[in-house]
Image (cartoon, rainbow, N blue to C red):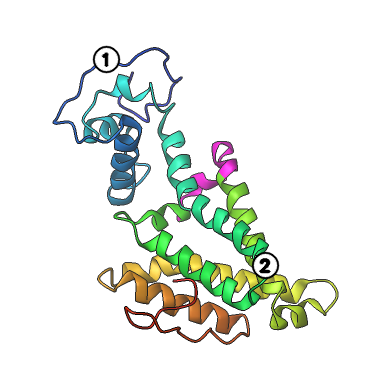
Amino acid sequence: MSGGTGEGPRRVGRPRADRLRADSGRPPREELLRAAAELFTVRGYAATTTRAVAERAGMRQATMYHYFGGKEELLAELLESTVAPSLELSRRLLADTGRPAAVRLWELCRSDVLLLCGGPYDLGALYLLPELRGRRLAGFRRMRGELRDGYRALLAATPAGAALAADGDGAALALRNDLVFGLIEGVMLVRRSDPARPVAAFAEAAADAALRIAGLTPPDPLPSPRGPARPGG
């Protein structure tokens, strides 16, 4: 295997025990994903080779191909990990029709920001890559589209969303939803300027702002033994 992009077919069979540094106790796939996340966000995707990812994970490049077919597959799995939990939550919130839609939309916004900004790596930088148009990332694009549709369905179930939908062609509702969804994804870039901000407070402020953009009033905090907490917290 070359040290370029290192793309190639995934090998079959049992990988050799060839770790180059002390075992962290994490599964090899997780170790490789953590290494890729670090290098893609620090060095940049184009400048990172599969050899560098493998070495950062403490294994040889050949061993990496037992787990991932190449750099694009690593990128795809990292990106999907930024969407999958929020997508699952959106499905549950859509089914939870016993509570106000505005509260459920707020909870989705907050949870999404916690996911996007709460990890150790700035995966939001990956959303700006031109490689996102590649065929291998079609799964990520599909998941992201379904999540955006989940936001829209929750917004449409609110009084403000219903009023927007009354225009007939849905353009006003779609625009407002795109603004809400864009804000939630865009907070990753805002957080870059001050990564020391407490993530929980940042997530609540972003959710409040998203609801105001939607034409809704953010839900009031609910008291708890640990102090004020938002609904569903």
Q: How dense is the environment of label 2, judged by Cα within 10 Å: few (below 14), some, or many (20 and up)?
A: many
Marking on residue 222: none
Q: How dense is the environment of label 1, judged by Cα within 10 Å: few (below 14), some, or many (20 and up)?
A: few
**Direction from residue 95 to residue 139 in the image, left or right:** left
Instruction: Count up the numbered dots.
Output: 2
Where is residue 132? Give x, y as percent: 52, 47
User: Is there a contact, CB below 8 Å, between mark 2 and mark 1?
Assistant: no
| Mark before the other along the chain sequence, 2 or 1 | 1
Name the main secondary structure of what is drawn in magenta.
helix
The correct choice, above or below, for 197 with respect to 11 in the image is below
Where is residue 41? Give x, y as percent: 32, 51
Which residue is label 1 attached to?
16
The correct choice, above or below, for 110 with respect to 37 in the image is below
Q: Quadrant of the C terminus?
A: bottom left
Is residue 133 within the magenta segment?
Answer: yes
Q: Which residues are magenta?
A: 128-139
Front residue of 225 and 154: 225
**Direction from residue 201 to residue 109 in the image, left or right:** right
Circle 2 SS class:
helix
Given the image, on which type of amino acid does mark 1 rest?
Arg
**Direction from residue 156 to residue 179 in the image, left or right:** left
* Residue situated furthest top in the rendering: 13
Where is residue 21? Give x, y as percent: 14, 30
| Residue at x 41%, y 79% (from the top left corner) | 229
Which residue is label 2 attached to?
152
Given the image, on which type of amino acid does mark 2 rest?
Arg
Circle 1 SS class:
loop
| Residue at x 47%, y 65% (from the top left corner) | 111
Is residue 7 within the magenta segment?
Answer: no
